[in-house]
Image (spheres, rainbow, N blue to C red):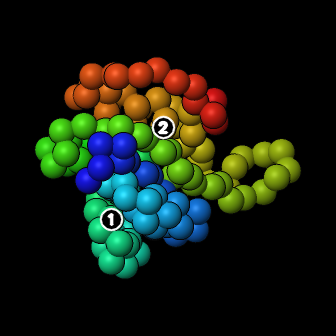
Amino acid sequence: MNRNNKVILLTGASSGIGYDTAVALAKQGHKVYAAARRMERMEPLREWGIVPIQMDVTNEAAMRQGVQTLLDREGRIDVLINNAGYGFFGAVEPGEPAIPFTTMSAPQVLISLSKASSESTPVKQVGTLPNS
């Protein structure tokens, strides 16, 4: 791998933008670790040298385990792309929600995942978070 190529952790890689981004980054020569809950949907990514890892970004222990798996193999994470998302379905009108809301919002997921990775890897550079 070229020194300019990065070790990338990409969440939400089982479909859509996450899946296509993983493929595009791998084609550029980066080492991509694709994370999602459903491993079977990421199996085709192996064709491009992408390493699927199981991770549920609403579960702190799962995030830490996923990050540790990557660090055990690579020793570093150069780029974190937090693409994972989840939705709520139910009535829009006032009243009790059809499905109870989770206590973890998208920014909290990013912070938790960033914290899990930075506790094990020294921060080399500080940048901006485009989705903050």
Mark before the other along the chain sequence, 1 or 2: 1
The amino acid type, in three-letter code, at marker 2 is Val
Q: Which mark is residue 68?
A: none
Taking the spot 40% from the left edge, 62% from the top edge, the residue there is 26
Q: Is residue 88 left or right of residue 55?
A: right
Rounded to the nearest angstrom, the CA distance separating label 1 from label 2 is 23 Å
Mark yes or no: residue 60 visible.
no
The amino acid type, in three-letter code, at marker 1 is Ile
Image x and y of residue 109, in percent: 48, 37
Image x and y of residue 125, in percent: 41, 22
Foreground: disc 1 or disc 2: 1
Q: Is residue 22 left or right of residue 100?
A: left
Q: Quadrant of residue 50?
A: bottom left
Task: Characterize the local packing of mark 2: few (<14), some (14-19) or many (20 or more) Cα atoms within 10 angstroms.
Answer: some
Residues marked 1 and 2 touching at CB (< 8 Å):
no
| 68 or 47: nearer the viewer | 47
Taking the spot 69% from the left edge, 49% from the top edge, the residue there is 97
| 123 or 120: nearer the viewer | 123
**Eyeballing the image, is 112 above or below 124?**
below
Q: Circle 2 sits on which residue? A: 109
Taking the spot 37% from the left edge, 54% from the top edge, the residue there is 30
Q: Circle 1 sits on which residue? A: 50
Mark yes or no: residue 122 visible.
yes
Helix, strand or loop at label 1? It is: loop
Helix, strand or loop at label 2? It is: helix
